[in-house]
Amino acid sequence: MANKIVWDKTGERFYETGVDRGVLYVQDDQGKYPKGVAWNGLTGVTESPTGAEPNPLYADNIKYLNLFSVEEFEANIEAYTYPEEFEECDGSAELTPGVTLGQQPRKTFGLCYRTKLGNDLEGEDYGYKLHLIYGAKAAPSDKGYETINDTPDAITFSWDVTTTPVPVTGFKPTALLVVDSTKVNAEALATLENILYGTDNLDPYLPLPDEVAALFTGEAPDVLELSSIDPDDETTDVAIDADIVFTFNNKIAKESIVVTDSLGEMVVGTKTWDVTGKILTFNPTVDLANDTIYIVTISGVVDIYGQALASTVKNFETVSL
Protein backbone atom coordinates (compact mmCIF):
# COMPACT_ATOMS: atom_id res chain seq x y z
CA MET A 1 0.00 0.00 0.00
CA ALA A 2 1.35 3.39 -0.98
CA ASN A 3 2.04 6.02 1.65
CA LYS A 4 0.58 9.43 0.93
CA ILE A 5 2.76 12.37 1.93
CA VAL A 6 1.47 14.37 4.89
CA TRP A 7 3.17 17.64 5.80
CA ASP A 8 3.76 18.96 9.33
CA LYS A 9 2.44 15.92 11.18
CA THR A 10 2.28 16.19 14.96
CA GLY A 11 5.66 15.28 16.44
CA GLU A 12 7.48 15.85 13.14
CA ARG A 13 7.96 19.61 13.29
CA PHE A 14 11.66 19.52 14.07
CA TYR A 15 14.21 22.25 14.69
CA GLU A 16 17.79 22.61 15.96
CA THR A 17 18.99 25.32 18.32
CA GLY A 18 21.60 26.38 20.85
CA VAL A 19 25.18 25.46 21.56
CA ASP A 20 26.54 24.26 24.89
CA ARG A 21 28.90 21.79 26.60
CA GLY A 22 31.95 22.97 24.70
CA VAL A 23 35.11 20.96 25.35
CA LEU A 24 38.63 21.73 24.08
CA TYR A 25 41.16 18.96 23.40
CA VAL A 26 44.72 20.06 22.56
CA GLN A 27 46.42 17.55 20.26
CA ASP A 28 49.53 15.79 21.57
CA ASP A 29 52.66 14.67 19.70
CA GLN A 30 51.06 11.31 18.83
CA GLY A 31 48.12 12.94 17.03
CA LYS A 32 45.68 12.13 19.83
CA TYR A 33 43.43 14.48 21.78
CA PRO A 34 43.86 13.83 25.54
CA LYS A 35 42.82 15.78 28.61
CA GLY A 36 39.75 17.70 27.52
CA VAL A 37 38.89 20.91 29.37
CA ALA A 38 35.59 22.76 29.58
CA TRP A 39 35.16 25.71 27.22
CA ASN A 40 33.01 28.03 29.31
CA GLY A 41 31.45 31.09 27.71
CA LEU A 42 31.08 29.47 24.28
CA THR A 43 28.41 31.48 22.43
CA GLY A 44 28.50 30.16 18.88
CA VAL A 45 30.12 27.80 16.40
CA THR A 46 29.51 28.38 12.70
CA GLU A 47 30.35 25.40 10.53
CA SER A 48 31.44 26.53 7.06
CA PRO A 49 32.23 23.76 4.58
CA THR A 50 34.04 25.02 1.48
CA GLY A 51 35.21 23.54 -1.80
CA ALA A 52 33.30 20.86 -3.72
CA GLU A 53 33.10 23.39 -6.55
CA PRO A 54 32.31 22.07 -10.03
CA ASN A 55 34.84 22.29 -12.82
CA PRO A 56 32.92 21.51 -16.03
CA LEU A 57 34.66 19.73 -18.89
CA TYR A 58 33.36 19.94 -22.47
CA ALA A 59 33.72 17.56 -25.39
CA ASP A 60 31.86 17.14 -28.67
CA ASN A 61 30.35 20.60 -28.12
CA ILE A 62 28.50 19.46 -24.98
CA LYS A 63 29.19 19.33 -21.27
CA TYR A 64 31.12 16.09 -20.89
CA LEU A 65 31.25 15.89 -17.08
CA ASN A 66 31.82 17.85 -13.89
CA LEU A 67 34.94 17.44 -11.77
CA PHE A 68 34.56 18.65 -8.19
CA SER A 69 37.27 20.19 -6.04
CA VAL A 70 38.10 18.69 -2.63
CA GLU A 71 35.69 19.69 0.12
CA GLU A 72 37.22 21.46 3.11
CA PHE A 73 35.75 22.03 6.57
CA GLU A 74 36.13 25.42 8.21
CA ALA A 75 34.43 26.98 11.20
CA ASN A 76 34.14 30.14 13.27
CA ILE A 77 34.16 30.03 17.07
CA GLU A 78 32.74 32.83 19.21
CA ALA A 79 33.01 33.05 22.98
CA TYR A 80 33.15 35.45 25.90
CA THR A 81 36.20 33.64 27.21
CA TYR A 82 38.36 30.62 26.50
CA PRO A 83 40.26 27.96 28.46
CA GLU A 84 43.81 28.74 29.47
CA GLU A 85 44.87 25.67 27.47
CA PHE A 86 43.61 27.37 24.28
CA GLU A 87 46.31 30.05 24.50
CA GLU A 88 48.89 27.78 22.85
CA CYS A 89 46.34 27.12 20.07
CA ASP A 90 46.00 30.89 19.65
CA GLY A 91 49.71 31.52 19.18
CA SER A 92 50.66 32.31 22.77
CA ALA A 93 53.36 30.84 24.99
CA GLU A 94 54.26 31.37 28.62
CA LEU A 95 57.47 33.36 29.00
CA THR A 96 57.37 33.11 32.79
CA PRO A 97 54.42 32.27 35.08
CA GLY A 98 51.74 34.86 34.40
CA VAL A 99 53.59 36.40 31.42
CA THR A 100 52.67 35.32 27.88
CA LEU A 101 53.96 36.31 24.49
CA GLY A 102 52.28 36.09 21.11
CA GLN A 103 53.19 35.16 17.52
CA GLN A 104 54.23 31.65 18.53
CA PRO A 105 53.45 28.36 16.71
CA ARG A 106 49.77 27.46 16.93
CA LYS A 107 48.91 24.00 18.23
CA THR A 108 46.30 21.78 16.64
CA PHE A 109 43.20 21.06 18.69
CA GLY A 110 39.91 19.19 18.69
CA LEU A 111 36.55 20.52 19.80
CA CYS A 112 33.30 19.01 20.99
CA TYR A 113 30.03 20.87 21.47
CA ARG A 114 26.34 20.08 21.68
CA THR A 115 23.31 21.49 19.86
CA LYS A 116 19.73 20.89 20.95
CA LEU A 117 17.09 19.14 18.83
CA GLY A 118 13.44 20.03 19.34
CA ASN A 119 10.00 19.25 18.02
CA ASP A 120 6.45 20.46 18.54
CA LEU A 121 5.69 17.91 21.29
CA GLU A 122 8.78 17.75 23.48
CA GLY A 123 10.40 21.08 22.70
CA GLU A 124 14.16 21.08 23.32
CA ASP A 125 13.90 17.86 25.35
CA TYR A 126 13.50 15.89 22.11
CA GLY A 127 17.23 15.25 21.75
CA TYR A 128 20.61 16.68 20.84
CA LYS A 129 23.60 16.35 18.53
CA LEU A 130 27.24 16.02 19.53
CA HIS A 131 29.60 17.74 17.09
CA LEU A 132 33.20 16.48 17.11
CA ILE A 133 35.83 18.51 15.23
CA TYR A 134 39.34 17.19 14.51
CA GLY A 135 42.61 18.67 13.23
CA ALA A 136 41.60 22.29 13.91
CA LYS A 137 43.88 25.31 13.80
CA ALA A 138 42.85 28.83 14.77
CA ALA A 139 43.82 31.78 12.59
CA PRO A 140 44.95 35.09 14.17
CA SER A 141 41.93 37.11 15.25
CA ASP A 142 41.03 40.64 16.29
CA LYS A 143 40.53 41.49 19.96
CA GLY A 144 38.77 44.81 20.35
CA TYR A 145 38.94 46.53 23.74
CA GLU A 146 36.75 49.53 24.57
CA THR A 147 36.36 51.84 27.54
CA ILE A 148 33.61 50.97 30.02
CA ASN A 149 30.62 53.28 29.64
CA ASP A 150 26.99 53.53 30.78
CA THR A 151 26.07 50.51 28.63
CA PRO A 152 28.93 48.09 29.31
CA ASP A 153 29.22 44.91 27.33
CA ALA A 154 31.56 41.93 27.56
CA ILE A 155 34.21 41.48 24.88
CA THR A 156 33.39 38.75 22.37
CA PHE A 157 36.31 36.75 21.01
CA SER A 158 36.15 35.14 17.59
CA TRP A 159 38.42 32.72 15.73
CA ASP A 160 38.35 31.43 12.18
CA VAL A 161 39.28 27.76 12.15
CA THR A 162 40.65 25.54 9.39
CA THR A 163 41.00 21.78 9.69
CA THR A 164 43.01 18.81 8.50
CA PRO A 165 40.87 15.66 8.12
CA VAL A 166 41.69 12.48 10.03
CA PRO A 167 41.40 8.93 8.62
CA VAL A 168 38.14 6.95 8.77
CA THR A 169 38.15 3.27 7.82
CA GLY A 170 36.05 2.68 4.71
CA PHE A 171 35.44 6.38 4.06
CA LYS A 172 37.28 9.49 2.99
CA PRO A 173 39.09 11.37 5.79
CA THR A 174 36.95 13.86 7.69
CA ALA A 175 37.31 16.69 10.20
CA LEU A 176 33.70 16.55 11.44
CA LEU A 177 31.65 13.87 13.14
CA VAL A 178 28.03 14.41 14.29
CA VAL A 179 26.24 12.03 16.66
CA ASP A 180 22.42 12.29 16.82
CA SER A 181 21.06 11.20 20.21
CA THR A 182 17.67 10.32 18.68
CA LYS A 183 19.20 7.75 16.32
CA VAL A 184 21.92 5.94 18.27
CA ASN A 185 21.98 3.38 21.06
CA ALA A 186 21.51 5.13 24.42
CA GLU A 187 24.07 2.98 26.26
CA ALA A 188 26.70 3.55 23.59
CA LEU A 189 25.95 7.28 23.64
CA ALA A 190 26.39 7.34 27.42
CA THR A 191 29.75 5.60 26.99
CA LEU A 192 30.82 8.17 24.40
CA GLU A 193 29.84 11.01 26.72
CA ASN A 194 31.86 9.43 29.53
CA ILE A 195 34.84 9.48 27.18
CA LEU A 196 34.24 13.05 26.03
CA TYR A 197 33.46 14.51 29.46
CA GLY A 198 35.40 12.16 31.76
CA THR A 199 34.44 10.08 34.81
CA ASP A 200 35.89 9.51 38.28
CA ASN A 201 38.24 6.95 36.69
CA LEU A 202 38.78 8.36 33.20
CA ASP A 203 40.20 11.69 32.03
CA PRO A 204 38.16 13.24 29.21
CA TYR A 205 39.58 12.85 25.73
CA LEU A 206 38.43 13.10 22.12
CA PRO A 207 38.17 9.66 20.48
CA LEU A 208 39.06 9.34 16.80
CA PRO A 209 36.28 8.46 14.31
CA ASP A 210 37.12 4.73 14.14
CA GLU A 211 36.90 4.54 17.93
CA VAL A 212 33.52 6.30 17.89
CA ALA A 213 32.29 3.91 15.21
CA ALA A 214 33.37 0.92 17.30
CA LEU A 215 31.26 2.16 20.21
CA PHE A 216 28.08 2.18 18.14
CA THR A 217 28.65 -0.86 15.95
CA GLY A 218 30.11 -3.24 18.53
CA GLU A 219 28.49 -5.16 21.33
CA ALA A 220 28.49 -4.12 24.98
CA PRO A 221 32.08 -3.99 26.29
CA ASP A 222 33.46 -6.93 28.21
CA VAL A 223 34.45 -6.44 31.84
CA LEU A 224 38.04 -5.16 31.77
CA GLU A 225 40.62 -7.87 32.37
CA LEU A 226 44.35 -8.42 32.13
CA SER A 227 44.40 -11.26 29.62
CA SER A 228 48.07 -12.09 30.03
CA ILE A 229 51.44 -10.84 31.18
CA ASP A 230 54.79 -11.98 29.83
CA PRO A 231 56.84 -12.91 31.82
CA ASP A 232 54.00 -14.54 33.73
CA ASP A 233 53.58 -14.20 37.49
CA GLU A 234 56.35 -15.95 39.49
CA THR A 235 58.28 -16.94 36.38
CA THR A 236 61.98 -17.69 36.96
CA ASP A 237 65.06 -17.64 34.71
CA VAL A 238 63.81 -14.58 32.77
CA ALA A 239 66.36 -13.12 30.34
CA ILE A 240 67.85 -9.83 31.50
CA ASP A 241 67.08 -8.19 28.13
CA ALA A 242 63.42 -9.26 28.15
CA ASP A 243 60.54 -6.88 27.59
CA ILE A 244 57.43 -7.02 29.77
CA VAL A 245 54.25 -7.36 27.71
CA PHE A 246 50.73 -6.75 29.04
CA THR A 247 47.65 -7.82 27.07
CA PHE A 248 44.18 -6.52 27.96
CA ASN A 249 40.81 -7.51 26.53
CA ASN A 250 39.65 -3.92 25.92
CA LYS A 251 41.35 -0.84 24.52
CA ILE A 252 43.05 1.07 27.31
CA ALA A 253 42.73 4.81 27.88
CA LYS A 254 45.27 5.24 30.68
CA GLU A 255 47.49 3.27 33.07
CA SER A 256 50.01 3.74 35.88
CA ILE A 257 51.97 0.50 35.65
CA VAL A 258 55.38 0.52 37.34
CA VAL A 259 58.21 -2.00 37.59
CA THR A 260 60.56 -2.07 40.59
CA ASP A 261 63.21 -4.37 41.95
CA SER A 262 62.83 -6.11 45.30
CA LEU A 263 64.39 -3.09 47.06
CA GLY A 264 61.81 -0.73 45.60
CA GLU A 265 64.09 0.86 43.01
CA MET A 266 62.03 1.83 39.96
CA VAL A 267 62.99 0.39 36.58
CA VAL A 268 63.21 3.06 33.89
CA GLY A 269 61.93 2.19 30.42
CA THR A 270 59.67 3.07 27.54
CA LYS A 271 56.04 2.03 27.06
CA THR A 272 54.62 1.29 23.61
CA TRP A 273 51.04 0.39 22.66
CA ASP A 274 50.13 -1.67 19.61
CA VAL A 275 47.62 -0.35 17.07
CA THR A 276 44.67 -1.93 18.91
CA GLY A 277 45.48 -0.14 22.16
CA LYS A 278 45.23 -3.47 24.00
CA ILE A 279 48.86 -4.63 24.13
CA LEU A 280 51.43 -2.64 26.12
CA THR A 281 55.15 -3.39 25.83
CA PHE A 282 57.52 -2.12 28.52
CA ASN A 283 61.13 -2.01 27.34
CA PRO A 284 63.66 -1.32 30.13
CA THR A 285 66.21 1.34 29.22
CA VAL A 286 69.07 -0.89 30.43
CA ASP A 287 69.21 -4.64 30.93
CA LEU A 288 67.79 -6.01 34.15
CA ALA A 289 70.11 -7.38 36.82
CA ASN A 290 70.80 -11.10 37.03
CA ASP A 291 69.33 -13.24 39.80
CA THR A 292 66.94 -10.48 40.87
CA ILE A 293 63.25 -10.47 41.73
CA TYR A 294 61.24 -7.72 40.01
CA ILE A 295 57.84 -6.47 41.11
CA VAL A 296 55.24 -5.39 38.54
CA THR A 297 52.50 -3.18 40.02
CA ILE A 298 49.54 -3.01 37.67
CA SER A 299 47.42 -0.06 38.77
CA GLY A 300 45.51 2.91 37.34
CA VAL A 301 44.40 0.89 34.30
CA VAL A 302 41.17 2.26 32.77
CA ASP A 303 39.69 1.24 29.42
CA ILE A 304 37.97 3.51 26.90
CA TYR A 305 34.61 2.62 28.43
CA GLY A 306 35.61 4.07 31.79
CA GLN A 307 36.03 0.67 33.46
CA ALA A 308 38.84 0.46 36.01
CA LEU A 309 40.93 -2.65 36.61
CA ALA A 310 41.55 -3.65 40.23
CA SER A 311 45.18 -3.11 41.17
CA THR A 312 47.32 -6.22 41.29
CA VAL A 313 50.96 -7.13 41.80
CA LYS A 314 53.00 -9.69 39.83
CA ASN A 315 56.63 -10.72 40.09
CA PHE A 316 59.33 -12.60 38.18
CA GLU A 317 62.98 -13.51 38.72
CA THR A 318 65.81 -13.06 36.24
CA VAL A 319 68.27 -15.74 35.26
CA SER A 320 71.36 -16.35 37.41
CA LEU A 321 74.86 -15.60 36.17
Image (spheres, helix red, strand yellow):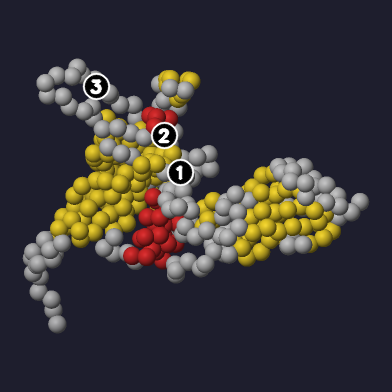
* Residue at the disc numbered 1: 35
Of all residues, the one furthest to the top in this rendering is 147
Q: Residue at x 44, y 48 (%)?
A: 205
Marks 3, 1: nearer the viewer: 1
Q: Which is nearer the eye, 126 or 76?
A: 126
User: How many circles with numbers are drawn on the protein?
Assistant: 3
Q: Is residue 160 left or right of residue 300?
A: left
Could one spot residue 280 in this view of the protein?
no
Which percent across, then down, holds residue 228?
Answer: 66, 64
Residue 252 sits above or below residue 71 on the image: below
Q: Residue at x 23, y 27 (%)?
A: 155
How far apart are the two marked residues, 3 and 1, measured between alpha carbons? 30 Å
Tell me which amino acid carries mark 2.
Glu
Q: Is residue 139 left or right of residue 126?
A: right
Which percent across, then down, holds residue 36?
Answer: 42, 44
Of all residues, the one furthest to the right in this rendering is 321
Indicate which disc, 1 or 2, sits on the residue closer to the N terminus. 1
Tell me which amino acid carries mark 1.
Lys
Q: Is residue 145 left or right of residue 305?
A: left
Q: Are marks 1 and 2 in contact (CB under 8 Å)?
A: no
Residue 172 sits above or below residue 80 on the image: below
Q: Which mark is residue 85?
A: 2
Helix, strand or loop at mark 1: loop
Q: Give residue 237's quadrant in the image.
A: bottom right
* Residue at the disc numbered 3: 144
Sort mark 1 into few (<14), some (14-19) or many (20+) by Cα contacts within 10 Å.
Answer: some
Indicate which disc, 3 or 2, sits on the residue closer to the N terminus. 2
